[in-house]
Amino acid sequence: MENQTRREFLKTMGFAAASVGTLSVLPSCTSLGQTWRAERKQPNIIVIISDDMGYADIGCHGCRDIATPNIDSVAQNGIRFTNGYVSCPVCSPTRAGLMTGRYQQRFGHEFNTGPPPGGLREQVGLPLTEVTMADVLKSAGYVTGAVGKWHLGIAPHFHPFKRGFDEFFGFLHGGHSYIDPSLGTFNPILRGTEPVDEKEYLTDAFSREAVAFVERHHNEPFFLYLAYNAVHTPMQAPQRYKGSFKHITNPKRQVYAGMLTAMDEGIGKVLAKLRELGLEEDTLLFFVNDNGGPTGANGSRNDPLRATKGTMYEGGIRVPFMVQWPGRLKAGRVYNHPVIALDILPTAAAAVGVRVPRDRKLDGVNLLPYLTGKKKNSPHESLFWRSAQNHAVRKGKFKLVKMGGETGLFDLSSDVGETKDLKAEQPDVLKEMEKTYERWNSQMIDPAWTIQRRKRKTTKKKKKT
Ligand code: CA
């Protein structure tokens, strides 16, 4: 973007004048190169997000029937969050929170974006008033790329190109076939804005594109957002794993194992490329899953957590979440204070040395001082969730859940499975938690659109996307 245009763009996006000012002296992205990297030690940023994976389905969470050595390696090379959350138990709002560092209820992105009926297509998507993580990193001269599932709006003005990304390969809706990506003209695989006739198993195609992005931009600071739709339905594994998971008796989970293995291997290829190019030390890489496993739909497992995707229980919102940055963060540790995917943006911005927008409230916290041990306290006093009439709040060891009209109070330090309701025993805690929630809730706005569901001719079971 030409400097003047970018300056105006950033001004309208609410960036501080000082931050905007630095852009005018920056050379173009391609000429920044290794000199800048060597002098400033500005890390590359990679955020890998999986879709509908179970909490229990990685080796470092105790999974024994499916191997995930590459995802596990991120925890081994970095830090695993044992109380890692996303801001919603379904796909699109979680992405809206991650991409902005803000509770998505601040800007009405409370529900999934699709499939929107009729004219709503133009209004349903990450509001254009929001500044994305790609906007922030682009303002620091980073080249930015999104690969995979977008799910933040399908109208042209919501396209990744309009939200800070220089490159895009993927699809705009909430889900996609893996085995014949050319199926379905309404939701094609796009390179940029153009449909492509992709033949490869979709997870492999996304891995291929992610590796190519790293290769293409290894001489300049980059931000890669790699959003696999694995292991979301439809249940389709690559042919090469046929017969590989005979030890798994549940047929759905057998297929799930193939889908998960393909993603894990793809992540391994990205990690290997970083090592090959000597970039591993200087790359801050997050792995997070977007919501709890929908166990019945895809054969995932969330144990020992309660319930599934779509709920305010831990099985809906506590997810595999880890970070590595070998050049800065000590390897092989676990971090137990609650953190949330909203923290990724401010952490990445701090690592890069760029300011986040100051004209709005960011809910995410820069985790670096906590992860280096400089700060010992919890990054968040409380965490909050809201989806229509359901909500939850986590404060210290306690969690209040309002789900389907039922209220529950749980002590997660002794009862991570949320089996023992303490509201009768701890009325004062209950009252305090409710007050805390109401204070937060009063800052949020009403949803900008209603829950979006596909209309079916024969309405059986309503599905979340
Ligand atoms: Ca999801």
Image (spheres, helix red, strand yellow):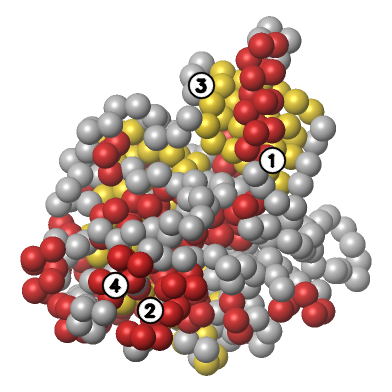
Q: Secondary structure at mark 2?
A: helix
Q: Residue 320's x, y, as percent? A: 44, 44
The amino acid beneath tag 1 is Ser
Q: Name the N-terminal-most of marks 3 and 1.
A: 3
Q: Secondary structure at mark 1?
A: loop
Q: Residue 297's x, y, as percent? A: 67, 53
Residue ID for mark 1 = 442
In the displayed orientation, state which residue is furthest to the front.
17
Position of 391 compared to 250: left or right? right
The amino acid beneath tag 2 is Arg
Residue ID for mark 4 = 21
**Do residues under tags 3 and 4 come within 8 Å of each other at their CB atoms?**
no
Residue ID for mark 3 = 397
Q: Residue 342's x, y, as percent? A: 47, 49
Q: CB at mark 2 closer than 8 A to ligand 1?
A: no
The amino acid beneath tag 4 is Gly
Q: CA distance from mark 3 to mark 2?
A: 45 Å
Dot in front, 4 or 1: 4
Image quadrant where one finds the N terminus:
bottom left
Above or below, 394 against 214 in this view is above
Q: Secondary structure at mark 4?
A: helix
Q: Name the N-terminal-most of marks 3 and 2.
A: 2
